[in-house]
Image: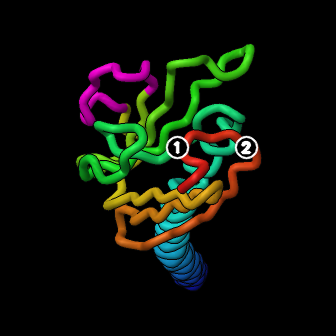
Amino acid sequence: MRRETTEHHMDGVYVLLLFAVFAGCILFVLLFGASSYEKLVERDRAAYNERTGIQYLAARLRHADSTEGICVGSFSDMEDIAADEINVLYLPFVGEDGPVPGFYTEIYYYDGYIREVLCAEDSGLSPEDGNEIMPAKGLMISKENRLITFSLTSEDGSQQEIKLFVRSGGDKNEGE
């Protein structure tokens, strides 16, 4: 009788030991997996931030590519890029029937954000009135003939640049 009790206790110890090893392995896999997952999420977030801003600008320009008024200027003067420190891409507002005369979408960098505002020509809006699109450290927009260059400094300090050709002719700054 005593021998059976000892065997039952030893079987219990083996089962408990096997359970502890199994639980330890699961814990190790979970900790290792969580660390790997965290690194993957951080890498994906950095890649997203790096691509999103410049692709947003490219998509907005492509959407507004028309024969009407794409130009680069300053916030206070649509045609003079040196009028103030805020350089702005002016895109004609495109409605259901095409561009709407006298209305522009302005895209610019101000106070740590890429901003966008839809307004009438000479609306009197100030730079802080624009909608914050995404955080950034800087945005330079330049135009040479029909080639528009965006140089974006992301929030993490990385730089991206894209050059886009305005396919439709007749824009306001054609002679630059």
Identified at 59% across, 35% down, the residue is 69
Q: Badge 2 is on which residue?
A: 169
Identified at 73% across, 43% down, the residue is 169
Identified at 49% across, 31% down, the residue is 105
Residue 123: in magenta span: yes
Q: How was this image coloured?
A: rainbow
Q: Which residues are magenta?
A: 118-130
Name the spot of residue 144 as percent of width and height, x first: 56, 61
Q: CA distance from mark 2 to mark 1?
A: 12 Å
Between 21 and 33, the one nearer to me in the picture: 33
Q: Badge 1 is on which residue?
A: 71
SS category of the residue bearing label 2: loop
Name the spot of residue 154 as percent of width and height, x first: 40, 63
Name the spot of residue 95 as percent of width and height, x first: 66, 17
Looking at the rendered image, the quarter that the N terminus falls into is: bottom right
Proximity of marks 2 and 1: CB atoms separated by less than 8 Å: no
Residue 106, image quadrant: top left
In the rendered view, does 129 fall on the left or right side of 120?
left
Specify the amino acid type for callout 2: Gly
Residue 129, image quadrant: top left
